[in-house]
Amino acid sequence: MELRNITTFLRVAELQNFTHAAQELGYSQSAVTVQIRQLEAELGVPLFERIGRSVSLTAPGQAFLQQAGEVMKAAERAKNIVRTAPEPEGTLRIGTMESLSASVISHLITDFHRQFPLVKAVVVTSTADGLLEMMRRNDVDFIYFVDEKQYSPDWEILLCKPEETVFVAAPQSQLASRKEPVPLRELMTYPCVLTEAGESYRIPFERLLAEHELVVTPILEIGSTEIVARMVRENLGYSVLPMYVAAEYLARGELVSFPVPEFCSNMFQQVMYHRNKWVTPQMKGFMQLIIDHVSASV
């Protein structure tokens, strides 16, 4: 039942004239007639008697008149509540990857809560495929992940930035002391610590190995990139990590990067939400914090 049709009904009932009601509402007379007929069809009863030029409410019309007024008052109260809400509140559901949660999201939570103190942020982690499925099911408000470039006409994409993937080792390791690039086949002779198989930033490495018919056997596989970085810093082996994880350690000299000439990554940092999603102020605020952070790190 459309509020527009109820508004028209109330005006016709007040003026008892279709033409005058149309003039006041800015409609054509035929539009007013159509709206009243739609309302009568929904209610299943006639609301007006039209005898000659005279228009009067039927008994059902009289009964509906009071209820229609209450409906419009309730609608106005609802508008006023939304317009005068002092601060956004509720829950913001963020879908991301474990590595981004530890390296980016956790650092932005404080800034977010300064802007939206009444909003509770819930961070859910999964793989890129898992996050896309969560977005489709509306289990999260938006997703932030690293993967090959993704696209669908059902998604609004706010960020799609290339993400560098680097090979890293401890400063005291043999790989760090190399002055020339390390060929892929030779790299297989060194121990390594990797994230779990199937993680998006590990996929280009796995594809490269498959192309060269090589197999890597890490001494440790674990989902936490922070633990991987710690193991590499303790010189247990090399690893391949996204730059947003490795950057701090490289800057402090706790890790060093080394080139592998055959390797090329095509990963992207991406922020997106479903096109049918209502973008709340808090949702817009956190997505902008991510975008600002990524832009500042360029």
Image: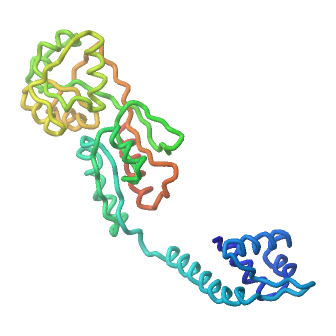
Q: Look at 34% across and 36% down and name the residue there.
A: 146
> Left of 100 or right of it: where is 294?
right
Residue 292 appears anywhere in the view: no
Residue 257 image position (x, y, % from top left): 21, 24
Give the residue drawn at x 38%, y 52%: 289
Q: Is 101 in front, or is 75?
A: 75
Q: Quadrant of the N terminus?
A: bottom right
Picture quarter containing residue 208?
Answer: top left
Q: Quadrant of residue 103?
A: top left
Q: Is residue 101 left or right of residue 34?
A: left
Res 80 quadrant in image:
bottom right
Q: How many marks?
A: 0
- Counting from the top left corner in percent of width and height, residue 242 is at 27, 32
Examine the rendered structure and indicate whether residue 263 appears above or below residue 245: above
Foreground residue, 250 or 60?
A: 60
- Is residue 290 among the parts visible in the rendering? yes
**Residue lying furthest right:** 52
Eyeballing the image, is 192 above or below 178?
below
Q: Is residue 55 left or right of residue 202?
A: right
Q: Position of residue 81 (x, y in %)?
A: 50, 78
